[in-house]
Image: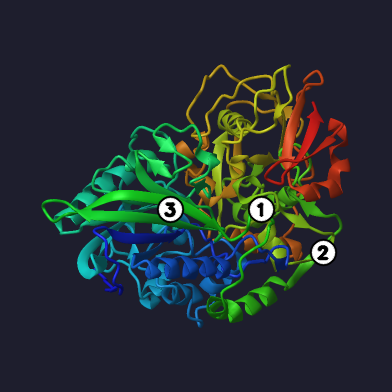
């Protein structure tokens, strides 16, 4: 194991030793506090600002003779055009390991998105890292792995004015679904184990190896309160493991402590305790710094025991006046050159559009950005279907919103003005480094596909208004299948839960599903073009349970969109219907759409719903009452 000894200095006379754990999670290469999609500064994000909080929190701890441990909890390497630039520009040393080293990170865990650029890329990162990169529940089959299953950190704490040795064990776990989501990068190369099962035996092993405390870097959120093998969000049962003393959680981009997890069983959301164990979840994009303070005593057997703990979050943006902390000059310098090159790369023109593209109304109105993406996907795949057995099979193109507000906030929407379009706009429409896939699906699977997507919506009753969408449903799991048309009846209950499990086979929200004006039959066969995440089972859509994949070369979706906008792909006219779905008449029932405040610029596009602007909610989302 890689270790890095640190010895605190000081003469605090106390029979308790103090440890401060600092944590970041889900940075997603938001390192500069800059929105490359909108080409403007964004003071709500960025490691350069989190770094200021890190230094302040570290200094406070050192002044109190506390040992400081610094961790990142995964999904740091992918998520912005800067991350794309850094991954593709091999001649440069990746700046993130340099910044982590300068900030004194003791270990970094892996998240599912860290595999988005492949294992070879992770190997390059590991070569430059001065800290251990960890993943306990994924085993790489090659002789040399870029990550370690755990780390053992020998350190010292101040006790009664003396430096006393202490040994910290660190494990790291991620969703087992990572192997499925990133199958195109990991298939045949890795094996994955359940989060809780892996953490249980890894923590026990660390204790047997002499670790006094165990910290879990858990790239997982707070979901079900009881153990289920293969859980994506397993932080609650994880906290039941006796050998684990503190947990850094993440993956869902939420925060803890905080009201977002109020009401969950075994969770004290105000104090950041799960099963009475300290847990922090520091948001995303560098928005928060997580802090866990531990007070330790030695028991009669001279073993260290946690006596008290405190979990807190510090935000880079004040909740009182909206002010933000300053950027750290040293950390900003690491990212300066890449920032300039990313801006230049993002500004490269690729074509022109005659109407603006935005995602403010993806759930109810026309989304020209999605119809453009659907057309580009179909146009890129069509040549590979020609002169094959699939040439005459009708084609559908499945797309879903990439930027839809949600946990990322009211500014996280695609918004591209008419006129010249550049690479930053391409990334704004489709933010992920996904590849194209094509599958065969019959009509019954298509209908279930649409039913699964329709689960996004709330069931509307006469005593409304209700929120139009289920807040527990993830926006990128709302697929629109261009080429087909259908209605959604929101008076009916959903057929599927958000995890893809069947609620009731008798439930049906989808009406009048058609292709070229003819009803879709259960035995009709289609080619569906989609991204690798969905084809690999991401989102738990029923169609991915038995996928019939069509062989394609490696095709990046962003490249297909760029080529289509540049006029290098032959149009298919698949997405001529900009809004292929509509809502069945609801007798003037009302629903509340939450969207970004800049949607006011396009409110006339919702005229069919007689929209009423209800103002902004506490999070800054615009609330629009719709009549269906």
Mark pair 3, 1: CA separation:
44 Å
Q: Is residue 278 shown above or below 343?
A: above
Q: Which residue is mark 3?
A: 183
Q: Which residue is mark 1?
A: 320
Specify the quadrant that holds the N terminus.
bottom left
Mark 1: give few (<14), some (14-19) or many (20+) Cα within 10 Å: few
Viewer-nearest residue: 92 or 445: 92
Viewer-nearest residue: 105 or 7: 7
Disc number for residue 474: none
Q: Earlier in the sequence, mark 2 or mark 1?
A: 1
Residue 178 visible here: no
Mark 2: give few (<14), some (14-19) or many (20+) Cα within 10 Å: some
Q: Earlier in the sequence, mark 3 or mark 2?
A: 3
Q: Which residue is mark 2?
A: 352
Specify the quadrant that holds the C terminus.
top right
Way the structure is coloured: rainbow
User: Is disc 3 placed on a helix, strand or loop?
Assistant: helix
User: Is disc 2 placed on a helix, strand or loop?
Assistant: strand
């Amino acid at each position: 194991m890689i270790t890095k000894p640190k010895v605190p200095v000081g003469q605090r006379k106390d029979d308790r030793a103090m440890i401060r754990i600092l944590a970041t999670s889900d940075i997603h290469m938001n390192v500069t506090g800059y929105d490359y999609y909108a080409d403007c500064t964004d003071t709500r994000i960025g490691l350069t600002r989190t770094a200021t909080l890190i230094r302040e929190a570290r200094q406070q701890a050192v002044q109190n003779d506390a040992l400081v441990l610094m961790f990142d909890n995964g999904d740091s390497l992918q998520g912005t055009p800067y991350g794309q630039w850094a991954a593709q520009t091999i001649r440069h040393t990746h700046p993130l390991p340099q910044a982590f080293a300068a900030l004194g990170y003791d270990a970094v865990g892996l998240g599912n998105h860290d595999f988005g650029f492949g294992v070879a890329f992770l190997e390059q990162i590991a070569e430059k890292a001065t800290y251990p990169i960890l993943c306990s529940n994924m085993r790489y089959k090659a002789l040399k792995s870029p990550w370690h299953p755990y780390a053992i950190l020998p350190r010292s704490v101040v006790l009664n004015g003396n430096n006393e040795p202490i040994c910290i064990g660190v494990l790291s776990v991620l969703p087992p679904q990572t192997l499925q989501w990133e199958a195109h990068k990991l298939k045949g190369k890795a094996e994955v184990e359940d989060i809780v099962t892996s953490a249980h035996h890894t923590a026990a092993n660390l204790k047997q190896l002499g670790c006094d405390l165990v910290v879990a870097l858990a790239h997982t959120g707070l979901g079900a309160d009881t153990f289920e093998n293969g859980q994506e969000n397993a932080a609650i049962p994880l906290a039941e493991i006796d050998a684990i003393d503190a947990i850094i959680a993440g993956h869902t981009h939420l925060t803890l402590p905080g009201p977002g997890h109020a009401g969950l069983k075994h969770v004290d959301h105000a104090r950041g305790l799960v099963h009475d164990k300290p847990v922090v979840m520091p948001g995303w994009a560098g928005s928060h710094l997580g802090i866990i303070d531990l007070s330790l005593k030695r028991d009669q057997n001279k073993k260290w025991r946690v006596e008290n703990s405190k979990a807190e979050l510090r935000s880079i943006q004040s909740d009182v006046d909206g002010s933000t902390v300053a950027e750290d000059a040293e950390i900003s310098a690491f990212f300066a050159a890449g920032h300039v090159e990313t801006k230049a790369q993002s500004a490269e023109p690729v074509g022109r559009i005659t109407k603006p593209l935005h995602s403010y109304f993806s759930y109810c109105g026309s989304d020209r950005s999605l119809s453009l993406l659907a057309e580009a996907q179909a146009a890129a795949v069509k040549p590979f279907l020609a002169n094959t057995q699939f040439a005459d099979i009708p084609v559908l193109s499945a797309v879903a919103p990439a930027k839809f507000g949600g946990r990322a906030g009211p500014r996280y929407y695609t918004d591209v003005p008419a006129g010249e379009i550049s690479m930053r706009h391409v990334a704004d429409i489709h933010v992920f480094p996904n590849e194209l896939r094509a599958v065969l699906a019959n009509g019954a699977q298509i209908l279930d596909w649409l039913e699964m997507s329709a689960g996004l919506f709330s069931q509307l009753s006469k005593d409304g208004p209700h929120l139009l969408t289920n807040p527990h449903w993830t926006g990128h799991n709302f697929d629109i299948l261009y080429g087909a048309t259908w209605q959604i009846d929101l008076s009916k209950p959903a057929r599927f839960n958000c995890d893809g499990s069947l609620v009731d086979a008798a439930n049906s929200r989808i009406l009048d599903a058609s292709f070229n004006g003819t009803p879709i039959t259960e035995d009709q066969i289609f080619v569906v073009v989609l991204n690798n995440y969905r084809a690999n089972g991401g989102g738990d859509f029923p169609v991915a349970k038995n996928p019939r994949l069509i062989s394609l070369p490696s095709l990046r979706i962003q490249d297909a969109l760029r080529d289509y906008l540049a006029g290098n792909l032959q149009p298919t006219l698949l997405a001529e219907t900009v809004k292929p779905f509509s809502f069945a008449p609801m007798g003037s029932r009302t629903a509340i759409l939450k969207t970004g405040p800049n949607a006011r610029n396009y409110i006339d596009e919702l005229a069919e719903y007689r929209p009423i602007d209800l103002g902004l909610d506490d999070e800054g989302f615009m609330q629009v009452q719709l009549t269906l």
